[in-house]
Image: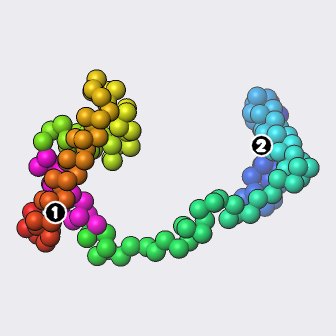
């Protein structure tokens, strides 16, 4: 058993608190402390300091306005409307549009999964989108669907 001072390892301790711990725990704490010191030294030597706005999308994230509850509700209603109209399409068109636009699959991947040619997938998706457009133009008010 080894004695350690908890103040050296935990910043919450403001005064010395000596406890006995098993040898393995003491060795592990010492190892972590050495690894942390080595990390700080490498950071200093390589001048690897980055600002908090290092990410490329920081400006975009800052400009994004928080949605109001009304906006969130309208967005949910639009999504429900879209899913209802999508459900009215034939099964193949619905599945292909869903796979391409919602799951992010390429048309070639969809064709490979279905064992058909890419041009069939493209025609089917285009026909489905045309049908969606006609249905949505027919009922511009979302409460009618």
- Residue at 23% x, 52% y is 129
Tag 1 residue:
136
Which range is magenta?
75-89
Q: Position of residue 73 (x, y in %)?
A: 26, 69
- Residue at 39% x, 38% y is 106
- As helix, strand or loop, the secondary structure at mark 2 comes to strand
Q: Is residue 79 magenta?
A: yes
Tag 2 residue:
19
Q: Are marks 2 and 1 in contact (CB under 8 Å)?
A: no
- Image quarter where the N terminus lies is top right
Residue 118 circle label: none
Which residue sits furthest top?
115
78 in relation to 2, above or below: below
Of the numbered discs 2 and 1, the one sitting upstream in the chain is 2
Residue 119 vs residue 35, the one in the foreground: 119
34 on left or right of 130: right
In this view of the protein, can residue 5 be seen by the observer?
no
Residue 84 vs residue 39, the one in the foreground: 84
Q: Is residue 63 magenta?
A: no
102 on left or right of 29: left
């Amino acid at each position: 058993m080894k004695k350690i001072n908890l103040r050296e390892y935990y910043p919450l301790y403001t005064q010395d608190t000596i406890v006995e711990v098993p040898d393995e725990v003491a060795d592990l704490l010492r190892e972590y402390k050495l690894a942390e010191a080595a990390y700080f030294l490498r950071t200093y030597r390589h001048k690897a300091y980055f600002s908090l706005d290092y990410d490329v999308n920081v400006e975009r994230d800052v400009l994004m306005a928080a949605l109001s509850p009304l906006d969130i509700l309208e967005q949910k209603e639009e999504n429900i409307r879209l899913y209802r109209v999508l459900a009215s399409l034939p099964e193949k068109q619905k599945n292909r549009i869903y796979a391409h636009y919602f799951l992010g699959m390429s048309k070639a991947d969809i064709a490979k999964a279905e064992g058909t040619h890419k041009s069939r997938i493209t025609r089917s998706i285009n026909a489905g989108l045309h049908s969606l457009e006609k249905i949505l133009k027919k009922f511009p008010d979302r409460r009618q669907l």
